[in-house]
Structures are given as structure tokens and as C-alpha cells.
Image: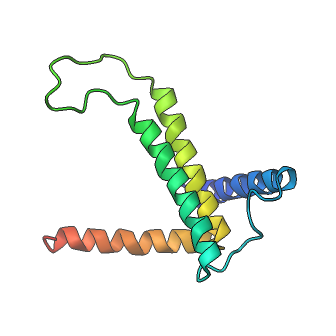
């Protein structure tokens, strides 16, 4: 994904957050929030859990993962599966925006963690 595409995703998500906040003022606090406060941590936790919930909805579309299942369910609605994953990512992007993470900080954190996991593989983690 190019940096421009990531910028576009962050911009679209923040635009959505602002639109929702205009219609429902209590939907989001003013951001960025101070994640050291109890209230902000609760808001972050709630957003993260909504993302996890959406990921579980995506997983609900997968029926052939059970090793004990004797028959296969031949069809999966890939579009619905992907839509739920996008919903999950939208919550996670909102969470990053809420705490003041921008595209550059996210990309740097991603790259740093990527190097860590590559080194773990090389070192026999």
C-alpha cells in the first residue's frame, strides 16, 4: 500500500468521524485524547472492542475451520467477509486518529514492529 493510499484511508475515516460527531455530539470526544486518563482509556477500550467484535462477525462467515467437521460448506460470501474486516479496520483507524496517531507515526510503528518480527523469525523465536 502506498503512503498516499494510507493517507486517503486516514482522511476518509477522520472525515467520517467529524460527520458523525456533528450529528451525534457524544459519539466521539474531541481528539486527540490523552490516553493517560481513565475516561480516555475507557473510550479507547470501547472502540477497540468494537473492532474486535466486527472481526468476530467476519470470522462468523467461515464455516470450514473445524477439524472435526465431516462436511464442507462450499460457499463463503467473500464480499460480506471482507466488508466485516473493513468494519473492524475502521474502528481501529478511528482509535488511532482518536489518540492522535497520523499516517507517518503509524507507518513508522508498523515498520519497527515488522523488523522485530522478522528478527524473531531469523533468531528462531
- Where residue 61 sits in the image (x, y, percent)? 40, 29
Left or right placement of residue 61 versus residue 70 in this view = right
Q: Visible in this render: residue 92?
A: yes
Specify the quadrant that holds the C terminus. bottom left
Q: Toward the viewer: 52 or 79?
A: 52
Q: Toward the viewer: 54 or 117?
A: 54
Q: Is residue 21 above or below residue 122?
A: above
Residue at left 29%, top 18%? 73
Q: Toward the viewer: 2 or 110?
A: 110
Location of residue 78 by image quarter: top left
- Where residue 51 sits in the image (x, y, percent)? 52, 51
Residue at left 66%, top 67%? 98
- Count the numbered circles shown: 0
Left or right placement of residue 12 versus residue 118 in this view = right
- Where residue 103 sits in the image (x, y, percent)? 61, 67
Q: Visible in this render: residue 2?
A: no
Left or right placement of residue 74 versus residue 48 in this view = left
Q: Is residue 16 above or below residue 78?
A: below
Residue at left 86%, top 50%? 23
- Where residue 77 sits in the image (x, y, percent)? 45, 23
In the image, farthest residue toward the right: 22
Q: Toward the viewer: 85 or 121?
A: 85
Q: How is the image coloured?
A: rainbow
Residue at left 39%, top 23%? 76
Location of residue 97 by image quarter: bottom right
Location of residue 99 by image quarter: bottom right
Amino acid at each position: 500500500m502506498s503512503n498516499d493510499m494510507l493517507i486517503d484511508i486516514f482522511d476518509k475515516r477522520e472525515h467520517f468521524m467529524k460527520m458523525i460527531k456533528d450529528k451525534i455530539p457524544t459519539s466521539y470526544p474531541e481528539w486527540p485524547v490523552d490516553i493517560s486518563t481513565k475516561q480516555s482509556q475507557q473510550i479507547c477500550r470501547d472502540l477497540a472492542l468494537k473492532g474486535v467484535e466486527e472481526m468476530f462477525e467476519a470470522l462468523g462467515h467461515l464455516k470450514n475451520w473445524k477439524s472435526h467437521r465431516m462436511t464442507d460448506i462450499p460457499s463463503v460470501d467473500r464480499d460480506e467477509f471482507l466488508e466485516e474486516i473493513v468494519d473492524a479496520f475502521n474502528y481501529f483507524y478511528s482509535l488511532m486518529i482518536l489518540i492522535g496517531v497520523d499516517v507517518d507515526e503509524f507507518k513508522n510503528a508498523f515498520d519497527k514492529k515488522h523488523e522485530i518480527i522478522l528478527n524473531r523469525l531469523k533468531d528462531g523465536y
